[in-house]
Amino acid sequence: MADTKANPGQSKQGLLLDIRNLRIEATVYPPGEAPKNIVLVHDVSLTLEKGKVLGLIGESGAGKSTIGLSSMGYGRGGVRITGGEVILNGRDILKTGKDGFRKLRGREVCYVAQSAAAAFNPAHKLMDQVVEATLLHGTATRAEAEKRAVALFKKLSLPNPETIGERFPHQVSGGQLQRVMTAMALCSEPDLIVFDEPTTALDVTTQIDVLAAIKDAIRDTHVAALYITHDLAVVAQVSDEIMVLRHGRLVEWGGTRQIIKEPRQEYTNALVSVHEIEHAEQKPGTAPFLSVKNVTAAYGRSHIKVLKNVSVDIYPGQTLAVVGESGSGKSTLARAITGLLPPEEGTVTFDGRPLANRLADRPKEDLRQLQMIYQMADVAMNPRQTVGTIIGRPLEFYFGIRGRERDKRVAELLDKIEMGKGFVDRYPAELSGGQKQRVCIARSLAAKPKLIICDEVTSALDPLVAHGILKLLLDLQKEENVAYLFITHDLATVKSIADSIAVMYRGEVVRYGPKSTVLTPPFDAYTDLLLSSVPEMEIGWLEKAIKGRRMASAGN
Amino acid sequence: MLDIKRIPIPALIGIVLTALFVLAAIFAPWIAPHGNAEIIGDVWEPMSAAHWLGTDNLGRDLLSRMIYGARITLFIAVLATALSFSLGAILGFSAAVFGGWYDTLLSRLVDLLMSIPTLIMGLVVLSVLPTNLVTLILVMGILDSTRVYRLSRAVAVDINVMDYVEAAKLRGEGSGWIIFREILPNALSPLVSELGLRFIYAVLFLSTLSFLGLGVQPPDADWGGMVKENKDGIVFGIGAALIPAAAIAMLAISVNLVADWVLNRTTSLKGGRG
């Protein structure tokens, strides 16, 4: 498969980028041992023709960004390109030295980073940053470059294209900033753009706009692109070919249709089918054990209500999913339930009695019944405590279990989360992302709660790892009969785990009910937007989805 | 788990020198060839086999004075640093955790103290109060604790908003657990490097006070006081004052080298085992 394509010759005049046997290494310095070399990318080859888009896909650590950056001769901190050739426009750029790179970067190859908010200099106006590379390379006068930039703003359907360049980065939304960054990359009319997860940090409803804008811009400017992402459904919309990478090695390389319809490798198949978990909806029981009634909340003494008159019920052993884009108030709802943010109006009742509004007024027993799992597992655990301490503390604190009895319970819990006893003495920094989240799950289970609030628990994880976590959560629910309040923006997750769904939009619950009812048409406008924005593993989905929309997303 | 071969050379030098000073301080009466205030020869004798470092302005053995000086200097500096750290860190952490008016009150009080130059404040207070060891240590410790308060509050404010602290609060933990078990271990590395620096500042501050005549009172003398006693000799080309000055510098540098190394070790999040 890959070999036939790697052979140059089929359309040699159209060949833009030809990477041959690329080998990238880095040196690690484990304390107490001699420094050693590790190979990040093992002899990967790829070719890209003019005007085509190649998607690079894989989990974190697959080497996709490293390969992408090598096309501009760049290695991130300490990473060295030690072998192979990177032939761009007919010359090996690795041999051109520092001056060669300087001429190449920002002129022939441009880069669009994952987090536009972190990549823009907050102290300069957008326009100055967009035209900077063009001016530095002297390919256009300032007036020409600005004219080009405005035309690009228009093409990327940014609001007020004439004046948006006068704004500072914090004055535009995340989705807009990402499109300005695309304009910045396109402004110097490069031959190749490297997109490094440009939509990963965005809401689904915003992602679809940015994706469409990027796709149109690529088509109209005939620029070639390397599109790096971990989301196969996204890459299927924009690229002509897809390359699947794992552990720095090529897994499979083929046309987009072939990869998503007829994957030839087991790993690709696992990526394609990752979203499918069968979960039969449970009928709501007779009495909810926790109900939120007409809760209104705001931060500080602000007049802007983050939650407006929200009411939801949670039944024993069931999952309520709260969906919405960022800023919709879904995390605030969790904070109101836990008592971190006392509601201004409304009540939270638990087991038929009202819960104290403030955290400090709640008895220990109530605190035990409500546990929480966070999005970022690495900051949810004290980095200076071992796994044993982290899981053992709730046992000591709530049940007074100490010593050998505690160690036994910790071992049982580790077993439940499918991790062995060997992890007891590990520090969080010594765990992988998925393992960290599992330890957090064990910590909340240790309290034997009735409800666990899961705040975006899978969104920071790779799809395959997230899949494992969701399965674990479902299994644990069956064993322990614990209820979940599952906060997420990912509808695929919702479909696979929820029993009932609450859709939130700007602080209000716009749609609420059992999963089957909520996901059956007719939809209200927002639910429709949300549902239609979830990328599907299907070619041509993007155009269909854009055409069928009834309202614009809030972040646009 | 601590392997001597793995300690970098600068740290090793620092450890050896610091240990030398500490040992001299602890065992002063046994090591010193002569008594502290014993006059054994002429004024400002040069270095000789009998008196390795010569004699001072009253004809006392300089080496013995140096060793006893180490004892007094280190004793006061260690106690003052310990006081400034426990006071500053506990107040700083609690200000960060409790917030509100408690935080405001403490912080403005500290601002007030810091707005007066430390040396002038120290001179004024010490010239009013009776000059003895306890007041000296208290004044130095309290003045220094303002800086520790600032640092520990700043570090703790950052840690206090981390999810794991929120998780502990949700669990219902008391402020004792949150301050000592969640925040303190994570604030330790900036504090440890600050500890080294603060200790050195304490030595320098003490030396300055003694040089100005408000620190340790004769016949006892710390190194700063010894510089003062012998400073007139410099005019006659006699370097006796330079020896305690060099000791101050050497102690400052070696403690700093150790602090740097400790900081490097503790920033690792894997319990120092790599």
Image: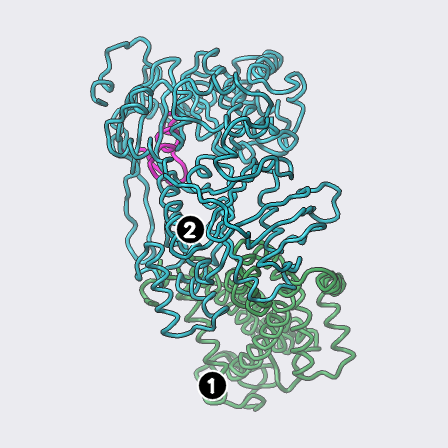
Chain colours: A cyan, B green
Kindly identify which numbered label has been placed on residue A177: none
Q: Is residue B163 magenta?
A: no
| Identity of the residue drawn at 55% across and 18% down | A156
Q: Is residue A66 magenta?
A: yes
Q: Amino acid at mark 2?
A: Gln
Q: Locate residue A468, reporting x and y percent.
A: 35, 45
Image height of A15 relative to B151, above or below: above
Q: Locate residue A549, reporting x and y percent.
A: 55, 20
Q: Which residue is mark 2?
A: A437
How many marks overall? 2
Who is closer to the viewer here, B204 or A24? A24
Q: Which residue is mark 1?
A: B27
Who is closer to the viewer here, A439 or A319? A319
* Mark whose residue sits in front, 1 or 2: 2
Which chain hosts label 2?
A: A
Instruction: Specify whether residue B34 is in view.
Output: yes
Q: Amino acid at mark 1?
A: Phe
| Identity of the residue drawn at 36% across and 18% down | A240
The kind of secondary structure element at disc 2 is helix
Q: Locate residue A56, reporting x and y percent.
A: 35, 27
- The local crowd at label 1, few if under 14, some if 14 to 19, many if 20 or more residues have their Cα within 10 Å, is few
Relative to residue A174, is residue A462 drawn left or right? Answer: left
| Identity of the residue drawn at 67% across and 78% down | B136
Relative to residue B133, is residue B188 drawn left or right? Answer: left
The kind of secondary structure element at disc 1 is loop
- Residue B109 lies in quadrant: bottom right
- The local crowd at label 2, few if under 14, some if 14 to 19, many if 20 or more residues have their Cα within 10 Å, is many
| Separation (CA) of disc 1 from disc 2 | 54 Å
For the record, the magenta segment spans: A61-83
